[in-house]
Amino acid sequence: MEFDSSVVRILLVDDRQEDLRVLRAVLESPLYELTLAPSGAEALRHVLRVDFAVILLDVMLPEMDGFEVASIIKQRERSRHTPIIFLTASGPELAAIYQAYSVGAVDYIEKPFDPAVVRAKVKVFADLHRKDQRIKQQAEALVAAERRERDLQLAAYRVASRERYRRLAEAIPAIVWTAEPLGVVTYCNRLWHEFSGLEVDEVLAEGWAEVMHPDDRKGWESAWSAAIARGQALEVECRLRRHDGQYRWHLWRVVPEHDEHGTRIGWLGTSVDCDDLKTAISSRDDFLSAASHELRTPLTSLNLQLQSVLLKVDADERMAPLRPKLESAERQARRLTKLIDNLLDLSRIAHRRLDLELEELDLGVLVEEVVVREREDLAKAGCELHVSSESEVLGTWDRLRLDQVVTNLLTNAAKYGSGRPVDVRVEASRERANIVVRDRGIGIASADQQRIFDPFERSVTHKDYRGAGLGLWITRTIVEAMGGTIGVESSPGEGSTFKVDLPRHAGC
């Protein structure tokens, strides 16, 4: 029922029934709704249920006087601003008047009542209440109008956003789709129909199973179910059947969508045809593998012949002038051999054929062997080498692959160490072993410290620091294949510290 702001509620509190009858007779009006209370307790019960425009309160009430009642009313948040007019006997003392105002009274009326005075004083506060109510209703109406306007604007914005999103999705050269939180597909763009020849309704009903390669279906469903369960993004490759029956590789990326409260409301997915790129990469890897194997045989023969010639030079002083050139040729042959080995590893990693041959070995002894072999190259780079190792750091690892890890780290230190000392430490705990290589060279910026472990990446691109950018990537791949990790701590100009952390029983 709508509240009539012209009618106000007034509470009359007096223990004398005759005074209440007089007050009611004086204030009887269609504009007032009068409530009568013969005690302070009854008055407080009314105040708890109803809001009043003004309260006329007798001072001399039994059990609980008017001052106590007023104090309780003012302590309540909802009624603390309700005007209270005290009713007093004629000739009130000044102290009583002060006490009335101290507990929150706004005025007082003397008994016996002067009807004109009672009506005039009550009218003042009744009119103020009506104005307050009108202001409050106008403010609420304004707030409601503003809320409706915002809701309309938000609804229009959402419609425009959805339409803009659909236009964008239709323009993207990839299959774009959306799904409900549990994975039911709700939308596919036009490229889906152009690729598959199927209508959107068919994928909405059947999912992707109808067009997915049978060999990829189980893996996709497992990965998709796991992503839904965990609420995590998904990236996977699988094959889709084109409208002509040919299966083509696609890269799928799916990310969860959340509302402003963080609740998952759906999924946004893309499927990009990567078949041509995948074929090209496969062809490249096959070529690199074949070329590397073909080059390795003559290089091995060349290295043997260079070593044979060097032995002859050592035996004949007349051939001594040839030694610098032969040593240079041998170094270049070793560089080429290492490059071919890296290309072979690149091919093996790409085809997931990086097999491990595990055996028990002493990590400290292996590191010493590599250091002896690489010490000359480090000395030529001006790097003094310091090695420390705990005794008998035994574990189960791949000897050749660990040799490759240490070699790559020392080569890296020689290249970027600026001719300053290099420290190599072998440390161990009960379950793990560490190889730590520290140089004092040019260092690596924090933004590059993850990138350098990616293929074909280097910390610097200056011509003085040449290389294919495969060494650290291969090192990381080998370390991870043995269940370990590799990281770097570095600052520009302060050198770098690489730490390899390995379980002492890799693969066991």
Image (cartoon, rainbow, N blue to C red):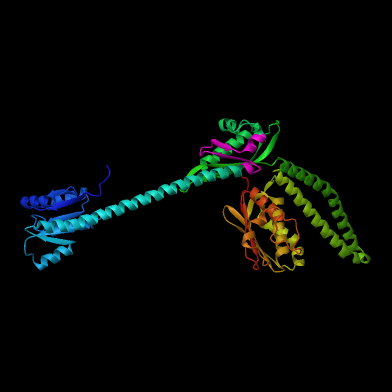
Residue 53: x and y in percent read 21, 53
Q: Quadrant of residue 374?
A: bottom right
Name the outermost residue toward the right. 318
Q: Is residue 392 above or below residue 225?
A: below
* Nearer the observer, 481 or 94: 94
Left or right for 237, reference 93: right
Q: Residue at x 75, y 51 (%)?
A: 342
Q: Is residue 192 magenta?
A: yes
Residue 68: x and y in percent read 14, 58
Q: Is residue 92 magenta?
A: no
Tell me the quadrant of the picture where the C terminus can be found. Answer: top right
Left or right for 7, reference 149: left
Q: Is residue 119 visible?
A: yes
Q: Residue at x 73, y 48 (%)?
A: 346
* Nearer the observer, 268 or 476: 268
| Count of number-bearing discs | 0
* Nearer the observer, 349 or 400: 349
* Nearer the observer, 51 or 408: 51
Q: Is residue 403 visible?
A: no
Q: Residue at x 66, y 52 (%)?
A: 476
Q: Is residue 241 above or below residue 397?
A: above
Residue 202: x and y in percent read 59, 30
Residue 280: x and y in percent read 75, 43
Tell me the quadrant of the picture where the N terminus can be found. Answer: top left
What is the magenta range?
A: 170-195
